[in-house]
Image (tube, helix red, strand yellow):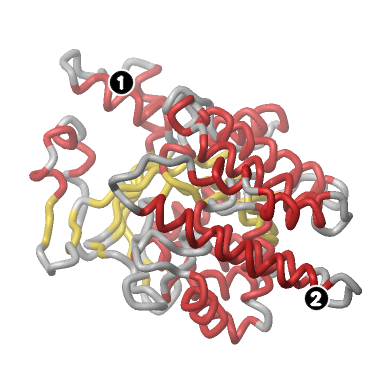
Amino acid sequence: TAYFTITNGPINRDGLNVWQELITQSQFVALGERHGSEATSQLVDAILPILDTTGYKHFAIEVGPHSAKKLVELSTPIEDTEKNLTAFIEKYAGDESYDIPIPFFNAISDAQFLKTARSNDMNLWGLDQEYYSSIKYFMDDLLTFEINSPNYKNLKATHKDVKAIIKKWSASDADNNTDIDFFAEIQKDTTVQRYLSHFRDKEVTSQIIKDLEISWDIYSRWRKDSHADRISYMRTNFMNAYTKALEKEKEPKVLLKFGSLHISKILTNGCYDLGELVTQLAIKNGTQAAIINSWHRYYIDTDGTEIDYLEKYDSYKRLRLFFEQAKKDEWTIIDLKSIRNDIAIGKVTLPTNGDYHRIKSLIDGYDYQLILPIDQASKGLVKNH
């Protein structure tokens, strides 16, 4: 176990050596995060300069491919990132905190690490489905491609009708007394299809329509194991971006920032996720992948109450040996690889009670366990978002 602090950007203390070593030795650094965490965004901002000095040029994130391009647009020029993101969220966010146009980039600290990534010339790889609430801004963005078209006036009128249709079905979807398939209803509408068909065969917009329809299908079939299709879509998007990077680089280095289950290198939720993909790719390349899990132990709730997850949740007690290393005022990083090696040579023995399963899945699934200092939800660029 090593500890570190972050002061105005740089990582300090022993943990700095751990980060420098794992970044330098790896082709892929995969950070499994707790979403909406202020501390996580601060950490990403702190490690990006280290990644930059060691040849990392690519940053894979849990947004759709075209939303990643939108983030590039919103962070151009870089100094206007916070202002642009704020205006974008204000325009497209709904009443609920989850109803945002692009997930995981709605906080002040998120805007900061996006600025740092762009300042270090990192390419953003959006791998995920396009977010549920992105449909409103995509309908607007599609129209901008035709602003100089002779058909623009008619298309704009159709666009207005489409937005009204989306608003109608969104209201029905938000009604707890109804059970509708929002995207199925949207796609059955002839006005919506007429609008989309205008962009379906155009070179600059055809892939947007394809990816939107893949995303909508995944959402529509969420009760029918579409999760497996979502993970395969992310893996395919990663390999497409990686293959393209190979055209210019012999060994592209990539930072991945996703929810912790996506980063595991063993089976999770019935799927072999991104962590497994980059682990196997590193083995094939003769390189390494650093797979990092992260937890809270101490957390300040929205009402100001301090929570100790170890004491509150019984399931965490099975991992007590790890949680007990946590400190409120410092980051904790535990080298699971060395524990895994000690198990292999018989130096460490796993327990035989029920704790075995949680501990073994942790040690087999990740190379490092990060425990954040006392944390809280990141502060939104826009109130309630």
| Image marks 2 and 1: residues in contact by CB distance under 8 Å | no
Residue at image point 44% right, 44% down:
292
Q: Quadrant of residue 135?
A: bottom right
SS for dot 1: loop
Closer to us: 93 or 284: 93
Q: Which residue is mark 2?
A: 153
Task: Pick the quarter of the image with the C terminus.
Answer: bottom left
Q: Secondary structure at mark 2?
A: helix
Is 26 displayed left or right of 312 in the figure? right
Residue occupying image coordinates x 62% and y 56%:
59
> For residue 347, which numbered disc appears in the image?
1
Query: Looking at the image, is 289 positioned above or below residue 88?
Result: above
Q: Which mark is residue 225?
A: none
Answer with left or right where residue 2 lies relative to residue 110: left
Picture coordinates of residue 58 (x, y %)? 67, 56
Question: At x 19% / y 13%, what residue is drawn?
Answer: 352
Q: In this view of the protein, which residue sits in the foreground, 2 or 280?
A: 280
Q: Amino acid at mark 2?
A: Lys
**What amino acid type should be assigned to the residue bearing mark 1?**
Lys
For disc 2, the neighbor class at 10 Å (few under 14, some 14 to 19, many from 20) is few
- In the picture, measured across the screen, residue 104 lies left or right of residue 174, that is right
Residue 245 shows in this picture? yes
Q: CA distance from mark 2 to mark 1?
A: 74 Å
Q: Position of residue 356 (x, y in %)?
A: 24, 19
Which residue appears at 69% of the width and 36% of the height?
236
Report the number of discs.
2
* Of residues 377 and 43, the one drawn nearer to the viewer in this rendering: 377
Q: Residues within 10 Å of mark 1 (few under 14, many from 20)?
A: few
Residue 206 in the image, given as x and y percentages of width and height = 81, 51
Mark 2 or mark 1, whichever is nearer to me: 2
Name the foreground residue: 150 vs 140. Answer: 150
Q: Earlier in the sequence, mark 2 or mark 1?
A: 2
